[in-house]
Image (cartoon, rainbow, N blue to C red):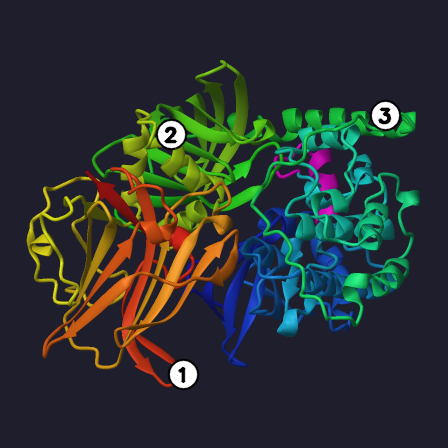
Amino acid sequence: MDTGTVFGKYHIRGLLGRGGMGVVYLAEDTILTRLVALKVLDRLVTTAPQFEKRFLQEARTVAGLNHPNIVPIHALSQIEEEWAIEMPYIEGGSLMEAEEKGALNLRQTLGCVRDVLLALAACHESGIIHRDVKPSNILLGDGQRGLLSDFGLAKILSDHQQLSVQSRCSASMFIGTPRYAPPESWEERTPTKTWDIYSTGMVLYEAIAGDTPFDAQTPLSLMKQMLERPIPPLKEAAPAVSDALSGLVSEMLAMNPVDRPQDVADVLEAFWALPELSGDSASPPVLVKPRPRRRAAAPIVRRMAATLAAPRRGFLLSALAGLIMLVLSGVGFHFFLQRSETIPVSPVSGDNAGHAAFDVMDMESQELRVGHCMALFSPDALGWRLLAVDTARLWLLDMTPEPDNRVRVSGYWTDYDRVSAMRFRQGAVAGKGRWVRPGEDMSVTLRLETLDDDLVGERSVLFKRANTPDGAARFLDTFSAADAVPALVFNELLPRDVSWAPTLEAALRELGLVYLAAPYRASGTAPVLLDGQLTEPAWRVSLAKDPRADAQVAPTDGPADAFLSAFRDDEALYLGIHLPSPLGPSRLLLALQTMHGTAQSHAPRWAFQVDHGAVVSSRAIRGGVAVPWDSDWGVAEHEATDAHAFEIRIPFAGLEMAAAPLGSQRWLLNCQAGRTRPGGMDDVARWGHEDLERTSRGLVLLFLD
């Protein structure tokens, strides 16, 4: 549903997320005038036989759980033939989001997981096994209080899966989330308390270490890693933790369920005794590693111990074979058997002229990735282009429609091979596909070939049309948040002059990524007096038109006749800001990112604040941690009756650079200008992202020779 849709008594305010059961919206209850989280269940699930009876039974059981660490169910509704669950809207977001931002220290993380264990204890006491404990199902309430959501829903989905497998339906999928599920989940055993204990242990391992111990991209390879790769102790990935905490996590992640703590109460007892949660707060809290979208796992250091029982090895191999049969018979090829009209199909409208957003579902894992793909097309062209991103991979695909709703695919891909220490790779893509629902769902099989070693792989995906009004902005958010993808573009493809890199960058600009040119002026030829007036020849000399960047950039938010401009010499970068009206008491905020690391949160950044022409604060962010920094940036401002201007000089030497940036190098920038007021600032103009230090989503500063 689009923002603004009226759905029963609810007014849809935006999309919060998607999952195996359906879509979660931020909605306003127009009767009680409050914001709620509204989960609208997928019709593939709700139309299953006996769904209503099973759903009401499970939901009533869950609704009876009254616990401060459980997200309660407010109401169940059937609206316009859709089933919906109303829950409170938790503004703190999820543990997954907090991990990606590096927002929690170790003590806070342990406190959150302790809250989850308390919730599970209440859940198990009522006879409910959660089955899907994972960071996205753990919400953060007031004071970082952990709240567990989606109780009982995995059981309903499990029942639906069994019916789907029996009927060879394409909706069949793994229950829970494979990366957090215990080994016995592949064996279709009846879930026990130790299932949830294992999942909680994996959540805790990832939250502290920065990733799970497995780096597999599909359930098939994950099962293989479970068989061959023992889980290293937490202390190897996070040496600062205590032996007691590392040992507890290892017990929770024991491969055999009988070797794990058998009750949540046992885990809680060990939790209370952890040194990290003791009352001694004399030492500073230890920061946990920020969680990447998917980070390289440690190499296999030894094979699974010889004491692994043969039956256990057998069940994994049997499950592997069963899953292969499921993929081949029920999932992977179902979409190619659909009948369709015999006309070429191309997207014809989108969230903006020439754009359409698509979500991507991996046909093997059934994982749905929201906001990961955009289609760009011309109204007078049959073909179109798809730009898609993953954690450390990027695709640029040309889609050519053919008769009978078929599609021919060609293009390029690039990634970092995490197994071999983030080695850069690129290659060609060829494939074919067919529209399952013309203009809505398209199933594609892609063949990937590397240019350096001729390795070949295949991947089947489903592109699902996303009816969202802000698809381009969401895609750019996903692009910037995928740690390794900006590094692929700015550190690899463009500096290497890869043939398809200019086409890729042009597509990013078309989607709304803003580029500001910083042309070169030889030192001494056009001296600048830092007076804030922008009257020197260096500011007035026209820039030869360069299709890659703009000479002046209007604000992302602010007056259309305001602008930001830039140039550089051998020693410094100069920024000029013009506003069409005086500010009075002024404030200027600026943040700059000079490098693109494979972990964006660790990229070096510099930020400062200027009030009334004087620097009042400055900080450098290194490795995700802000440290004091004595800024050597110069700034001057000038106020006239009808305008306000700033000039900023940023010496390269103060940015820890051995030499001035080369032509075609790209930095990232956020800037805000406004009026000071008691307790804050009123923005007048903003360039880049509203979160000043989120430079990964800022405008691109392109250095020109």
Look at the image and tell me in which quarter the C terminus lies: top left
Q: Is residue 481 magenta?
A: no
| Left or right: 40 in relation to 378 | right
Q: Is residue 280 above or below residue 168?
A: below
- Magenta stretch, overall SS: helix
Dot 3 alpha-carbon crowd within 10 angstroms: few under 14, some 14 to 19, many 20 or more: few
Q: Is residue 161 magenta?
A: yes
Q: Which residue is mark 3?
A: 314
Spatial CA span between label 3 and label 1: 65 Å
Mark drawn on residue 397: 2
| Left or right: 61 in relation to 471 | right
Q: Looking at the image, is mark 1 or mark 2 earlier in the sequence?
A: 2
Q: Amino acid at mark 2?
A: Leu
Res. 354 visible in picture: no
Disc 2, disc 3: CB below 8 Å? Answer: no
Spatial CA span between label 2 and label 3: 41 Å
Q: In terms of image quadrants, where is residue 508? A: top left
Outermost residue on the bottom side: it is 678
Q: Nearer the viewer, mark 3 or mark 1?
A: 1
| Left or right: 662 in relation to 119 | left
Give the residue displayed 14% in from the left and 45% down from the top: 521
Q: Looking at the image, is mark 3 or mark 1 earlier in the sequence?
A: 3
Q: Which residue is mark 1?
A: 679
Give the residue displayed 56% in from the left and 45% down from the top: 293
Residue bounds of the magenta highlight:
156-172
SS of the residue at dot 2?
strand
Q: In terms of image quadrants, where is residue 296? A: top right
Q: Looking at the image, is mark 2 or mark 3 earlier in the sequence?
A: 3
- Residue 548 in the image: state x and y as whole percent: 22, 40
Mark drawn on residue 586: none
